[in-house]
Image (cartoon, rainbow, N blue to C red):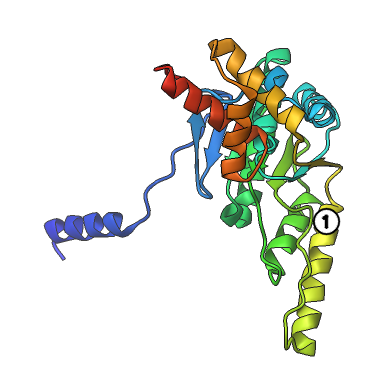
Amino acid sequence: MNGEELQRLIAAVERLAPPRVSETDWSAAPAYAWTGRSAHPIAAIVAPRLGQLRGIDRQKRAVAENLKRLAAGVAAHDMLLWGARGMGKSALLRAATISAQQDQPSRLAIVQTAGDALSSLPQLFQELGAVERNFLIFLDDLAFSGTDAIGPRQLRSLLDGGIEARPANVRLAITTNHRIIQSRVSDGETEAEAMHRRDALDDTLALADRFGLSVGFHACDQATYLAIVAEYAAPLNLRWTDDDALQWARQRGARSGRTAWQFVVELAGRANLRL
């Protein structure tokens, strides 16, 4: 093989190889997105102010205090935020992170990833453990099927019980619409299927027990929903009525913080405002 043929072979092999993963500067940004192989920085966290989140005062206090502890480098809990859709679980985590970053500049970053990247978290732990900064790994809207035995066990091991200890500067926060996976009996279920379902349920219960801080969110009543609308609309000087806001919620079948914000977006659009 002459030199020219060798160069063509090397070039062909390089084209087949996966792209090189660039090294992440974990001190440069307030937030990151982890893909399972690499991370990219996010310049700014988008979230409402903590004071704008209404109807979840108890939840705000618990989450904000825990994140302040993490930012300060003292003992902090892994967090499970569960319950009603649209009541501010992920918004609270983002807003509380911003608040903790203000109190402790550069001491805390949030790293968002997806449930299908669970197997890559040990690699992420290894990277973050070598950094002089504290990190919250955020898995949003996590769900396991009722027969999934692998996912809950994998996450449970990552939280507590794995052979490789999680770094002291890393904690996990998970949001889900369910505290645990509900056990459902199907018609004609065999004994083996019932046993598998019970095992999966046991795994999810054991997973929920791994979180030091478990915070529930519940659907809001009418007064709270209107208060949320008012909190979002006031800084924009938007005009609205209770009847309009309630009609909007009825059309969507839910009163929640998300529904309130969507109503305010509609009001802003009618007023030719840009958010």
Query: Which of these two is toward me, 64 or 56?
Result: 56
Query: Which of these two is toward me, 36 or 80?
Result: 80
Q: For mark 1, what is the residue?
A: 161
- Residue at image position (76%, 52%) is 164
Residue 111 visible in the displayed image: no
How many discs mark residues in the rendered view?
1
Question: In the image, residue 109 lies at what x, y percent?
Answer: 64, 28
Query: Which of these two is toward me, 70 or 1?
Result: 70
User: As displayed, is residue 69 above or below residue 114?
Assistant: above
Name the quadrant containing residue 93.
Answer: top right
- Residue at image position (84%, 51%) is 210
Q: Give the amino acid at mark 1.
A: Gly
Question: In the image, residue 17 lies at what x, y percent?
Answer: 35, 57
Question: In the image, residue 218 lies at what x, y percent?
Answer: 78, 41
Given the current orientation, which residue lies at the most extreme front position?
243
- Left or right position of 244 against 103: left
User: As displayed, is residue 262 above or below residue 142?
Assistant: above
